[in-house]
Image (cartoon, rainbow, N blue to C red):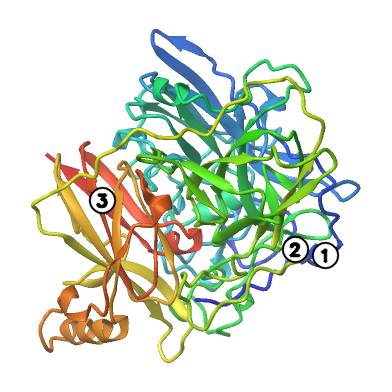
Amino acid sequence: MRRSTSMLAIGVASLSTLACTNVSPPASATLDATRIPQFVQPLPIPAPMEPTGRDGDVVEYRIEARQFEQQILPPPLPTTTVWGYGREGDPSSFHSPSRTIEARSGEPVRVTWINALVDDDGDFLPHLLPVDATLHWADPGGHGHHVDADAVRYTGPVPTVTHVHGAHSFDHSDGHPEAWFLPDARDIPEGFRRRGPTYRTQGDAGEGAAVFEYPHDEPATTLWYHDHSLGMTRVNVYAGLAGMWILRDDVEDALGLPGPAPRIGDAEGTRYFEIPLVIQDRSFTNEGALAYPTSRTEFGDYDGPYAPDSDVPPIWNPEVFGDVMVVNGAAWPYLEVEPRLYRFRILNASDSRTLILHFSDDRARFVQIGGDGGLLSEAPVTHEELVVGPAERYDVLVDLSRFAEGDTITLLNRGPDEAWGGPHAMPPQDPADPTTTGRVMQLRVIARSDAGTEGAVPDTLPVSEVPTTALAPRDLVLIEEDVEGTDAPLHVMLGTLEEGALMWDAPATEVVQLGDTEVWRVANTTDDAHPIHLHLVQFRVLDRIPFDADAFSTAQERWLDGEGAQPVLEDFVTGAAIPALPQERGPKDTVMVWPGTITRFVATFDRAGEYVWHCHILEHEDNDMMRPLVITP
C-alpha cells in the first residue's frame, strides 16, 4: 500500500447530539508545510504526571482525557484544538503528548482513567476528526457495519480506553479495544451503550471512568500509553491521546547514565540530560486545526462505490502521512544542548510512518542501550541511523562532547513519505521530503555547565537469555485483501495457514496455554513492512527467512478454495535466515515484519487472560488487522 495520502483539511466539528451524519464541516485549505518556520520553538520537555496519593504501597492517579488548545505550530500561527491526558482538576497538566508517568519496578500503580470529553455544560464533545461508522468499531449506538448512506460519519459521544503499550498487565487493565466507555455526559443519546462488552474496572469508578491496576513486575523499560478503542484508535491518537510511561529499577540506576530526567517540582530552567522524544507526523489547516482525511478518495486509488453500496469504507484510508514533523507537541522544535553525553528515549508515535533517523553531522551517533522491553542484552550498539517503526522505542546515548558552543546539528529522517517496504524494497523508495518530513528537530550547542550527572556509556549490559521451547511453531500470515477487480486495498488482515485472512470478530485462533513458550512464524505476503505488536509479552526476535510470498499466496488460495494441499511455509523458503538485527538484541513487544519474509520470534505467555495482537500502523489495526490472543490455564 505504498501510496502517499494527499491531505485535505477539516475544521473542528460543531457540537451535535446526532449519532451519525454524512454532512462534513466546511473544508479549510491545508496549511502549506513549507511556510511553517522550522527550529524556532523550544522543544517541550514533558514533566512527570503528579500522583493523586498512595494507598499503602500503591501509587494512585486520577487521569482525565480532555479537549484543549495547544501551541503546536510556531506563533504567530494559530493554536490547535487537541485532546490529551492530564491530572484531574489541574488544567495546567494537560498536554499532547501527555505528561510522563514515572514509576519503579515493584511499585504498583492504580489509575482511574476518566473520559472527560465534555464541554463546560456537561454535553459530550463530538470527535475532532471524521469517524468512519462503517468499520468494525466501538459503535456505542449499536448500528453495526451496515449504516445508511446518511450515517457513515459518526458525530456522537466518543469512546475511550487506555492501553499501556508494552506493560506486563492483567487483562482487566490492559485496555482491551472493546473495554471502552463513554464520557459521563448529560446528553448521551437514548439507547446508546455507555460501556463496551469487555469493560472491567478494579474499583467503583462511576460512569465515564474505569480503574486499572499495573503491578510493574517487569524490569526498567520505556513504555507508552495511548487510546485503544476498537476501530478508532487512529483518530483518538491523532487527536492527541498518547504519552510516555517510564519504569526504572536498581539495575538501570547502577549503570551511571546521564541525568537528570524531568522530576516533579523541578525549578524553572532546570537542565535535563535524559529527555523523551515523542515523534509524530501531523498536518494542519490554515486555521491551525488538525487535518485528517475526510474521504477514501484522498488516498487516490479508488473512486467508489463506497459503503453502504459496497464493502469499501468511505472515510477510512489505508495509511495516513502528515507533512509536519512534531516532537513532544511542537512542530520542528529546537533543543539547546551542552557538549556532553545525553540520553534520549525515542518513541515513534506516528500513525503509519516508519522513521529512519540520522544526524546531519556524522560526529553524532546513536549508542543504543535499550529498546521496547528494556536494556539490550550484553552490550550497547552504535548506529549511524535508526529505523524506528510505528510504536517502537529506542533508548539511546548521544555524545555531543565533540561539538563546540554555537554548533547546530539537525536530526534528520530519510524514511519514505509512504508505507515502508523494508530494507530491500523494490524499486527503492524515495526518502522523505528533505524540506519538511526529512527534518525532525535541531540541536543547538550552548556553553557547558556543571549541572546534572555526567554519566558514561556502559561497556556492558546485563545478559538476558533467549527462551527456548520444544513446541512446534505457530504459523501466521499477513494478507492484503483488495477491492474486487482493483489493486485498491480493502483490508490488511492477520490470519492462519489453515483459515487464511480472519476478521477481528472471528473465533480466536491464537489460543496459548498459560506458561508455554512458543515460536511464532509470521509470513508477510504484502508489499509493506508491518509493525506487529503483542500485548502482555516481551518477545525475542530470532530471524527473518526469505520466502516466495506470491507462490505461497497462490497455494493458500487454492487450499482455501478446496483444491490442493494446505501449504507448508518450509516449501516456499528461498534463502538463508537473516539473524535478528543488533538493535533487536533484547526484549521487544513490536517487530517490523518485512515483506517477503517469515519473521520468527519467541515468547513465554505467563499471565492468563484475553489480550490482542495487531499491526501498529493505526489505520491497519482499526480495519481488522487485529486478532484475539487468549492465554488459558
Question: Which label belongs to residue 629?
Answer: 3
The answer to whether the residue labelled 1 contacts the one labelled 2, judged by CB atoms less than 8 Å apart, is yes
The numbered disc on residue 34 is 1
Give the labeled residue for mark 2: 436
Q: Distance between the Cα atoms at labels 1 and 2?
A: 7 Å
The answer for how far apart the CA atoms under marks 3 and 2 are is: 39 Å
| Residue 596: x %, y % from top left | 35, 76
Quarter of the rendering containing residue 505: bottom left
Residue 584 vs 169, above or below: the answer is: below
In the displayed structure image, the side of residue 573 where residue 211 appears, left or right: right
User: Nearer the viewer's eye, disc 3 or disc 2?
Assistant: 2
Which amino acid lies under the numbered mark 1 shown in the image of this protein?
Answer: Thr
Q: How far, Cα to Cα, is label 3 from label 1?
A: 44 Å
Residue for point 46% across, 89% down:
486
Residue 326 higher or lower than 572, as above or below: above
Q: Nearer the viewer, mark 3 or mark 1?
A: 1
Picture quadrant where residue 27 is located? bottom right
Quick one: 2 or 304, which is closer to the camera?
A: 2
The first of marks 3 and 1 along the sequence is: 1
Q: Is residue 31 above or below residue 74?
A: below
The answer to whether one can see residue 205 in this image is no
Residue 555 placement (x, y as % from top left): 20, 85
